[in-house]
Amino acid sequence: MIAQKYQKMLSGKSAIRELAEFAAKRGEEIGYENVFDYSLGNPSVPVPAEFTQVMIDLLKNEKPAKLHGYSPSLGITSVREKIAQSLNHRFEMNYTKEHIFMTSGAAGALAHALRCVTEPEDEVLTFAPFFPEYHPYVDLTGAELKVVPPSKSDFQINFALFEEMLNEKVAAILINSPNNPSGIVYSTATVKHLADILRQKEKEYGHEIFIISDEPYREILFGGTDAPYISKFYANTLSCYSYSKSLSLPGERIGYVAANPACKDADEIVSICGQISRGIGHNCPPSLIQLAVAEVVDLTCDMSVYERNMKLIYNKLMELGFTCVKPGGTFYIFPKALEEDAKVFCKKALKYDLILVPGDSFGCPGYFRMAYCIETEKVERSLAALEKFVQGEY
Amino acid sequence: MIAQKYQKMLSGKSAIRELAEFAAKRGEEIGYENVFDYSLGNPSVPVPAEFTQVMIDLLKNEKPAKLHGYSPSLGITSVREKIAQSLNHRFEMNYTKEHIFMTSGAAGALAHALRCVTEPEDEVLTFAPFFPEYHPYVDLTGAELKVVPPSKSDFQINFALFEEMLNEKVAAILINSPNNPSGIVYSTATVKHLADILRQKEKEYGHEIFIISDEPYREILFGGTDAPYISKFYANTLSCYSYSKSLSLPGERIGYVAANPACKDADEIVSICGQISRGIGHNCPPSLIQLAVAEVVDLTCDMSVYERNMKLIYNKLMELGFTCVKPGGTFYIFPKALEEDAKVFCKKALKYDLILVPGDSFGCPGYFRMAYCIETEKVERSLAALEKFVQGEY
């Protein structure tokens, strides 16, 4: 028989995906260049040319049977070493290769990290607004995701509600800073306060509470943003990274888990990830991509377009009277809708070919997300449409 | 806390991996060319040059943001179409792209197929000798793997014992033909008989029993072997494929699930695989590798070395008085050891720098596996060592 659990999931369609499909269809009618599609977080800038060159060199010069051979189950040793060194250099950490587990992007990293530190029936807390895929990521491990309501004034952490929700069953806190969908970055004060509370609760409950830090947007930061490296502030941290955004390689599925060297069982965690792999059919990201990424480990693509777009959009939103927390990074912005039901608001926007995503599925009704990883020229044209929309309807 | 289930697995070291590590270490002492390492099934021949050229062309000519962008969650549409057409052409099937789900190799394919058609507490039956990783693959889904003892005279299916073990809890049969470790291929008669029994039991139990057919060695066949395409004989079949062996790309993690178009819920199975992905962090094999493999979908590398090696080894084994079923494909052979305990036998062989893997972990004590995906010149030298070993010790 077909497994019921997954069959049931089929009925629940993703709001983001439905909007992206609408945008594609509308594009066929009026030309996609005229659809102001803010639905998907697909990077719009190219990978650094150095990456492409490294790939071509490897393909031309390396022996195929070696190049395409099995990766060791924890990742290619030299790659893990380079990543550890890069993190140490950038964030003053002391990782060794033993703390780095190579994964198929952040989704793979989270799948391992979650299984590593939770048992079925445990609770995992996250903070709204949050990436909707956290639900299947967590719920299908057997643990339960619980969502702390947002702090709407700044999208930092609502600590009062967080402390109310903490209890002995909480095994992990899943955070995402810089944040999808709000674009905000947790401040040093926020991270310190979070760490203090968790250390106290660990003592009280007599067991570890891990931070699982989902960091695919770590490299997309706007000028002047206070952006602490989470793991520096809390030993029991598993950092989950992906090169999807920083190198514009989302389709190549490459990332890692970095276990803080001071965390509980630090020397075993990566090996445990290797065991988890056997159960979920993961077996390493592609060898070739591992080798190539390691050669450009300290590079990012030119991501200046994201900050340029953010400023244009933010300024126009302010001018039009929106309430909005200014993003510190990512390529998302999360303003308050101009009426209570953001789904109605976003539906009205479709008439102006503006594809906005209601905040409901991010755990924050009444708000909407714009993913501005698109060309600046299109952003500029979209803002005229936004102005027309707001003035026509409100 | 660190999850106990996976922590316990750490203590159980793989016999194959231990032997491979021993071989590498011994290689440092006497030169790896003098270690007759038959431990690992890592393809020794290069990927077709066409693949490398396609990769370089894509990297040089395709827009990076498009080339490396997210793959749709079920796989790239054009790639799924090409694979369906190739299977239809080769095996007279009628797949469409809707029946093909792209995965990270056979491990990824099995992870999805198993979750698709089993619920926790269900039983999955497999036939000894079998690939030891089937245990974590199945057991960590919540279902239970049960092993039907081998038919030692031919390593086809022991139907008497199989029928004894069938019961209402059996949701799937996991088969692997051509087989690791025996190298044998299920005959048309075997597959037909298996299908007949399953159809009858489906009626009796009132639920489907799926065949999950693990086929990474499908393209490595030796002259004259009867090698039926399993899915032709049984509608409720999910074929799990990997290009690891046929294109010598094990490190690039590329394969698929092909659901028989006549199977139960055929139109939903691939979408269900997409839902399963969300829970296990899979999210597609790499875009670039998908695109490149689709361009060489009907090619294989030159695998003639495997048959050449098999014949040399098989003939020598016969000459030395071993009992052995002649392989019909793969790059494995699975002779009977010359004493009851194959672990003792394989340990003695180490003195002659022969790295043989005892059959115990394959569910078939008293036998041993040789993975002859190595150079023929080395095979020839190894046979002198084998002769010396046998004549010296037995």
Image: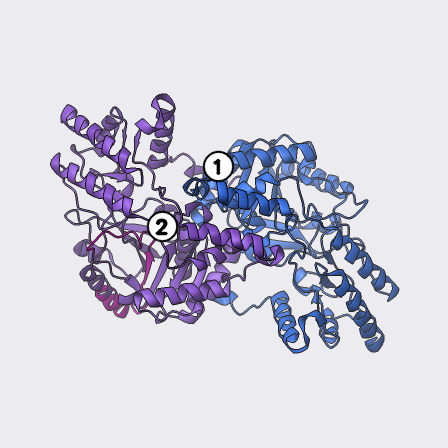
Chain colours: A blue, B purple
The stretch drawn in magenta includes residue B218: yes
How many marks can you see?
2
Q: Quadrant of residue B88?
A: bottom left
Q: Residues within 10 Å of mark 2 (few under 14, many from 20)?
A: some
Q: Nearer the viewer, residue B271 or B256?
A: B256
B164 with respect to A193 (left or right): left
Q: Chain of mark 2?
A: B
Q: Nearer the viewer, residue A372 or B88?
A: B88
SS under mark 2: loop
Q: Which residue is mark 2?
A: B301
User: Is residue A113 in sight in this rendering?
Assistant: no
User: Is residue A116 in sight in this rendering?
Assistant: yes
C-alpha gap between disc 2 and disc 1: 34 Å
Q: Which residue is mark 1?
A: A271
Q: Amino acid at mark 1?
A: Ser
Q: Quadrant of residue A231?
A: top right
Give the magenta-colored segment's residue range: B196-225
Q: Of tags 2 and 1, which is closer to the observer?
A: 2
Q: Residue at x 50, y 56 (%)?
A: B284
B3 w.r.t. A132: above or below: above
Q: Position of residue B108 (x, y in %)?
A: 43, 53
Q: Which mark is on residue B390?
A: none
Q: Residue at x 50, y 38 (%)?
A: A76
Q: Chain of mark 1?
A: A
Q: Nearer the viewer, residue A143 or B42?
A: B42
Q: Position of residue A213 (x, y in %)?
A: 64, 45
B313 with respect to A348 (left or right): left
Q: Position of residue A216 (x, y in %)?
A: 64, 48
SS under mark 1: helix
Q: Residue at x 35, y 28 (%)?
A: B32
